[in-house]
């Protein structure tokens, strides 16, 4: 009966860290294709205690490290959702970092560019940010005590789409390389898209053109619900494409739970998705199996 208060304290602690940790800028100057004119980045908390980060034009990431005696070398870049218009940076961001740190995983929360840029595809600027973030982290892996071949992406909704887009477009960098860090691969080593959005084309007949599943797509864990619009169909199509290309993949479709729950517990079995995901990570050799 003491578990819930403890979890609440850990979540509160993670949110305090979010305000005290120093973010690392993605780009040495202006991000590719930026034209300026946006208001400064801001954050607000709504009546459901969901933190919304707005107007990101200077993308950055923040590092959340587990206890030194628990660190296992695996790293995850967190991609909050928000329709490519805002970032749900608490229940799909810092709260996720707390869970990952408990597994011994080093977490990096990426604040990619939002809202959507006029005249550009919804994911174009965020994809540049995600690819650049992967290369930076891989180039500095020893600094954070992580393995350069165990760096994955975990994204929610639009962040889940960005997770899949990044994982299936690593063969072509979406910007001109600017320094030695861009010589590092921008291929994630595994993908964890949770209720990913926008995976299908407008006709809902096949995967969207930017979702290019091939034999080099990283191993993937997907989680959706049957009552979440067409996201279950999109996840199923992604899973089938993985299967056809012999990519190790696991897809969980829960009956109920809707969309946007993140780390919130709404009383549905899907709200324990992270326990199932933890088992998958053990099976992939990303975190140790305590039972062995």
Image: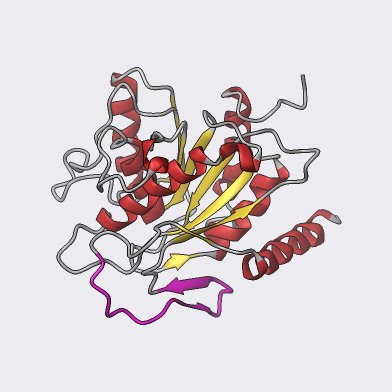
For residue 195, side relative to residue 265 (left or right): left
Q: Is residue 38 magenta?
A: yes
- Quadrant for residue 141, please give it: top right
Instruction: Name, please, the residue furthest toward the front.
Output: 180
Residue 96 is situated, as x and y percent measured from the top left of the image, at 60, 53
Q: Position of residue 148 (x, y in %)?
A: 53, 32
Question: Quick check: 117 left or right of 126?
Answer: left
- Residue 153's x, y, as percent? 47, 42
Q: Residue at x 49, y 39 (%)?
A: 139
How many discs mark residues in the rendered view? 0
Residue drawn at (56%, 74%) of the image? 48
Q: Residue at x 55, y 62 (%)?
A: 23
Location of residue 248 (image quadrant) = top left
Q: How is the image coloured?
A: secondary structure
Hey, which residue is sitting farthest right in the picture?
2
Which corner quadrant holds the N terminus? Answer: bottom right
Give yes or no for residue 109 being in the magenta stretch: no
Magenta stretch?
A: 34-54
Residue 277 image position (x, y, % from top left): 57, 37
Identify which residue, 9 or 37, lies in the foreground: 37
Q: Main secondary structure of the magenta part?
A: loop
Viewer-proximal residue, 185 or 241?
A: 185
Residue 265: tell me if it is visible. no
Quadrant containing the C terminus is: top right
As displayed, is residue 32 above or below residue 233? Answer: below
């Amino acid at each position: 009966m003491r578990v819930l208060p403890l979890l609440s304290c850990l979540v509160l602690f993670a949110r305090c860290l979010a305000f005290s940790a120093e973010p690392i800028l993605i780009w040495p100057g202006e991000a590719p294709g930026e034209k300026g004119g946006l208001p400064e980045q801001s954050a607000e908390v709504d009546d459901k205690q969901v933190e919304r980060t707005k107007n990101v034009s200077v993308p950055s990431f923040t590092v959340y490290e587990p206890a030194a005696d628990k660190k296992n070398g695996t790293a995850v870049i967190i991609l909050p959702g928000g329709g490519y218009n805002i970032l749900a940076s608490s229940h799909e961001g810092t709260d996720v970092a707390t869970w990952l740190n408990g597994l011994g995983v080093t977490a990096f929360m990426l604040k990619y560019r939002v809202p959507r840029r006029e005249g550009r595809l919804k994911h174009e600027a965020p994809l540049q940010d995600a690819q650049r973030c992967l290369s930076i982290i891989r180039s500095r892996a020893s600094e954070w005590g992580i393995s350069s071949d165990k760096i994955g992406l975990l994204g929610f909704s639009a962040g889940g789409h960005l997770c899949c887009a990044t994982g299936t477009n690593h063969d072509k960098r979406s910007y001109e390389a600017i320094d030695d860090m861009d010589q590092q691969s921008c291929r994630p080593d595994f993908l964890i898209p949770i209720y990913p959005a926008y995976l299908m084309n407008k006709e809902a007949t096949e995967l969207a053109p930017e979702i290019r599943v091939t034999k080099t797509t990283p191993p993937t864990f997907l989680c959706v619900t049957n009552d979440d619009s067409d996201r279950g169909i999109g996840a199923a199509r992604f899973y089938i494409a993985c299967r056809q290309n012999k990519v190790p993949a696991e897809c969980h479709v829960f009956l109920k739970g809707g969309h946007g729950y993140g780390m919130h517990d709404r009383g549905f079995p899907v709200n324990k998705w992270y326990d199932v995901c933890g088992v998958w990570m053990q099976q992939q050799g990303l975190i140790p199996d305590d039972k062995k």
